[in-house]
Image (cartoon, grey):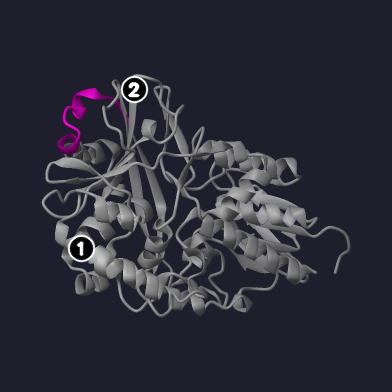
Amino acid sequence: MKSGPKTVAVIGAGAAGLSAAWRLLAAGCTVTLYERRSEAGGRLRTDELEGVRFDAGVQLFGSNYTSWFELARAAGAGDQVVRSPGRDAVWRRGRANPLTYGSVASMITSNALPTTLKLKLAGKYLPFLTRHAMRLDLHELVKTGGVELDTESIAAWGERELGHDFVDLLAYPLLGAYYGSAPEETSAAVYHALARVGLDVAVYAARDGMGRLAAAVAAGVRERGAILRYDTRIERLNWSGYGITLEAGRGAERFDAVIIAVPAVEAQRLLAESAVAPWLTGVRATPTCTLALVLKESVPVDYFGLSIPRGDERGPVVAICMQERKVRGLVPPGKSALVVIPAPEQATVLSALEPPALLERCLPMVERVIPGVRSLVVRARMTAFPEGYTIFYPGYVKHLRSFKPEVVPARCALAGDYLVAPTVEGAVRSGAAAANRVLASVG
């Protein structure tokens, strides 16, 4: 075994990879970070059109994202994280009704919900959360009782316990807009954990956009000594002796250890012959996309996210995010920028369309809830996310519990939200945990 600082490669510069790299650098390792795209961040992505900046992927953070906030502060990017008003609305009966998804108190008082459902929330769901879900932690589901609530979907649980309106008006818009999944494919444990967080949560945005925040964290990682190699896809890993060789198009480099912080499907490709490959096949993700619309005039609304539930208004869109209502500075005065999020059950089909076809599929629904918007559009852009969102399906928490780090090849660790929760916070926590495992393996 060689002496001196340990050399560690981190594959992937999303939130998980940045977190892993920071932890390794703090421990004195020499770190090289590889990213197949030209910038860091993954779904933390900000694009620009006509002088307007819009977040194409992740829109907001919850106040429970403590590890992510700590990393941003440590990397010198803490000033990029700012409080957002958090005002949302749900489209029902031809109008936008104020509602904070995840907040049971808001649900109970909102005009968006039928009286019978509000009575059930107050009389049955709040007591249920108090009795069965108050110790649930979205980012520690295995350890805090998530396995017991993981046997069925939130659609099955909701239909039985609270009725059809609970599934279509509450679970569907929340899960589709923020996590890319439908109630039928989401574990009840995940939804209950989200509802528990919603009892007392604030939301935060990135002052200059999510991509700028990720770039600032990456800059902090570089300033601490990491080497960042963008536009580099790792083709294969070779173990020989005490070391791991990473092969890419530009050549090969050898390291003491490696952290694979990429989507599970990519991790499975790199570790196809390893004992962890069968476990990785149990991770599911759905390709998705977003559609950004730049408008020449501002839209007179006072909410950020407009969710469109299932029912009479069912269509290709689950939510529309007004970027200028999230945080000041992204959109110049007098303009608007909308990010349209596809319905989860149609996301795979929509993400395969050419941009003009996607625009024509989605624009009628946007026009229905924001009349006149078609005449205001000056530019549109589609952003595809082929890796999609991790789907925490019924039984996935049990699948998480079955994960054994020791079956991963020597001096190698996995990182990604699929190991914790489908959030930026989950990715960050997984990155730190992967770094700790690698540090233990290399001494």
The image shows residue 42 at horizontal and vertical percentages of: 50, 48
Quadrant including the C terminus = bottom right
The image shows residue 149 at horizontal and vertical percentages of: 37, 76
Crowding near the residue tagged with mark 1, few <14, some 14–19, many ≥20 C-alpha atoms within 10 Å: few
Using residue 54 as the reference point, say whether residue 35 is left or right of it: right
Callout 2 secondary element: loop
Using residue 62 as the reference point, say whether residue 170 is left or right of it: left
Q: Which residue is mark 1?
A: 119
Q: Which residue is mark 2?
A: 335
The quarter holding residue 180 reads bottom left
Of marks 1 and 2, which one's residue comes earlier in the chain? 1
Using residue 264 as the reference point, say whether residue 254 is left or right of it: right
Q: Residue at x 26, y 64 (%)?
A: 122
- The residue closer to the viewer here, 421 or 144, is 144
- 129 lies above or below 97: below
Residue type highlighted by circle 2: Lys
- The residue closer to the viewer here, 28 or 412, is 28
Using residue 401 as the reference point, say whether residue 151 is left or right of it: left
Crowding near the residue tagged with mark 2, few <14, some 14–19, many ≥20 C-alpha atoms within 10 Å: some
- The residue closer to the viewer here, 91 or 46, is 91
Q: Residue furthest right?
A: 3
Residue type highlighted by circle 1: Leu
Callout 1 secondary element: helix
- 366 lies above or below 42: above
Q: CA distance from mark 1 to mark 2?
A: 41 Å
Q: Residue at x 40, y 36 (%)?
A: 326
The image shows residue 267 at horizontal and vertical percentages of: 53, 63
Check residue 378 for magenta coloring.
Answer: yes
The residue range painted magenta reads: 367-380
Quadrant including the N terminus = bottom right
- 111 lies above or below 255: above
